Amino acid sequence: MRIAIANDHAGHDLKVALAARAQALGHTVVDLGPAEAGPVDYPIYAHRVARQVATGAVDRGVLVCGTGIGMSIAANRHRGVRAALCHDAFTAEAARRHNDANVLCLGGRTTAVAVALQILDIFLATDFEGGRHERRVQRIETEEEP
Ligand code: RB5
């Protein structure tokens, strides 16, 4: 898969580890920055990755800030983007199976590197379950009462 990845200053080190892992798994990694490790505003990078996912330029996105919260809030402003903040194997698997999440958000200050790598592996390897979840995922975009 093609995977866009980005971070803010609190997510830099974890982003580097995640990018290396995704590459080692055979994926094409598109690193959208920042180029330097200094302080940056996370929404800029969340929007960069989300735009790539929303337009179909990449298959998945990965975003890392201090908690993963700001990145997920910003990325989810984009139609068609389902950004999931994951903390463990269970949430990573559910994000894919139930929510068809296409952007993984992680916290560089909240999640250990080994756990984050496990989360990434699951996020990239797990298929969407479909069925009843298909209808629910579609309703995320419509906002209409049934
Ligand atoms: C940066 O200090 C921090 O606010 C940011 O990385 C992120 O955790 C925001 O959600």
Image (cartoon, rainbow, N blue to C red):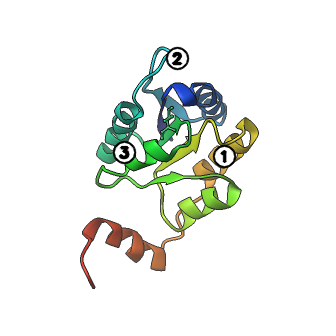
Disc 2 within 8 angstroms of ligand 1 (CB)? no
- Tell me which corner region of the image, top left, top right, bottom left or bottom right, holds residue 16: top right
The image shows residue 117, relative to residue 10, as above or below, that is below
User: Circle 2 is placed at which residue position?
Assistant: 37
Can residue 59 be seen here?
A: no
In the picture of the structure, the residue carrying the numbered disc 1 is 121
**First along the sequence among labels 1 and 3:** 3
- Residue at 51 percent across and 40 percent down: it is 62
Q: Which residue is mark 3?
A: 74
Residue 105 in percent (x, y) is at 52, 45
Is there CB contact under 8 Å for labels 3 and 2? no
Looking at the rendering, which quadrant does residue 114 occupy? top right
Image point 57% across, 43% down: which residue? 106
Q: Which residue: 46% across, 20% down?
A: 39
Looking at marks 3 and 2 on the same chain, the residue that comes earlier in the sequence is marked by 2
Question: Residue 142 or 111: which is nearer the viewer?
Answer: 111
* Residue name at image x 42 percent, y 23 percent: 40
Tell me where residue 92 appears, x and y as whole percent. 61, 56
77 to the left or right of 129: left
Secondary structure under tag 2 reads: loop
Q: Can you tell which of label 1 and label 2 is closer to the viewer?
A: 2
How far, Cα to Cα, is label 1 from label 2? Answer: 25 Å
Q: Amino acid at mark 1?
A: Asp
Q: Is residue 40 left or right of residue 108?
A: left
Mark seen at residue 25: none
